Image (spheres, rainbow, N blue to C red):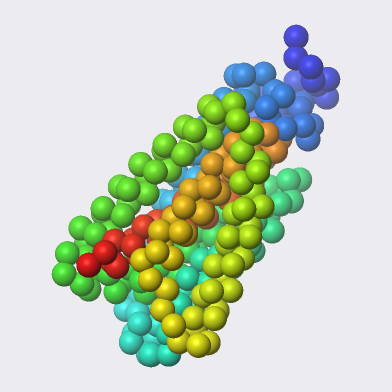
Amino acid sequence: MSSYDPIRSPQDGDAGATSLKYGNRPAIHAPETDRATFVGLVYKHIAAAVAAFIAFETVLFVTGVAGAMEDFFFRGGGGRWMLLMGGVMVVQWFAGNAAADLLNPSRQYIGLFGSAFAQSLIFAPFLSYVFGQSGGGATVAEAAVITLIGFAVLTGIGLFTRKDLSFLRPIVMWGFGLALVAIIAGFIFGFGLGLWFSIAMIGLSGAAILFQTQGVVKRYPIGSHVAAAVGLFNSLMTMFWYVLRALMQRD
């Protein structure tokens, strides 16, 4: 018998009813079938956010906005492109804030698809620049494959390891904070952030995915799958950004 005291029985496919049944207790305490359904919904929403990102990005390229943004950030001088790297982390902060309201699904959806739109704006000039280079399309495809394989491996570790990964959270928070300081300093003082910075950021993004994946069932209650998807989506996109940047820097 479940340890929960149901408030009312959920209807089939009714995530809201299931949420009411289990209250605000983390999903890890729910029966295995409900927990598996919850995790599946999290990753379906991540996939939906990726699809939305691709759709937004396509519009930006078709309308010429991506090219105009490339001219501003990459050809305008002054290290403006470094602002984009800072933007990746700022988007994470605002999206996490919007998704933190577990009792407001509308705000969670704004956080998720607002993140997809913001990420498309941040990526547009970078992708436009990469596609303009020799073999740029192949480089983007290679970065996407590497990122998806890394995400899949880290997801498996995060979901099935018995080790408590919560110790990674302060490391990631401090790491991203220091990275943001380095980006701002580089913009102000005009120094570059090379390949090793990209590699370090890939590692930080991987650590974030690990503890966020484990946190899906340990921190979020049944019914808050949209909120759980927000952080993972943004960490996935951050990893993709720095994998692509590292591939562009390898030569």
Quarter of the image with the N terminus in it: top right
Q: Position of residue 160 (x, y in %)?
A: 53, 27
Quarter of the image with the C terminus in it: bottom left
At 30% from the left and 47% from the top, the residue drawn is 145
Question: Is residue 200 rendered to the left or right of residue 5?
Answer: left
Q: Is 109 or 184 nearer to us in this picture? A: 184
Relative to 131, say whether 51 is above or below: above
Question: Is residue 87 rendered to the left or right of residue 195?
Answer: right
Q: Quadrant of residue 94?
A: bottom right
Outermost residue, front side: 196
Q: Visible in this render: residue 60?
A: no
Q: Quadrant of residue 129?
A: bottom left
Q: Is 170 or 139 nearer to us in this picture? A: 170
Outermost residue, top side: 1
Q: Visible in this render: residue 47?
A: yes
Q: What count of labels does the image hold?
A: 0
Q: Position of residue 151 (x, y in %)?
A: 43, 43
Q: Position of residue 30 (x, y in %)?
A: 70, 23
Outermost residue, left side: 134
At 40% from the left and 64% from the top, the residue drawn is 196
At 47% from the left and 32% from the top, the residue drawn is 156
Relative to 22, say whether 150 is above or below: below
Q: Is 118 or 203 nearer to us in this picture? A: 203
Q: Quadrant of residue 211?
A: top right
At 73% from the left and 46% from the top, the residue drawn is 102
Q: Position of residue 159 (x, y in %)?
A: 54, 31
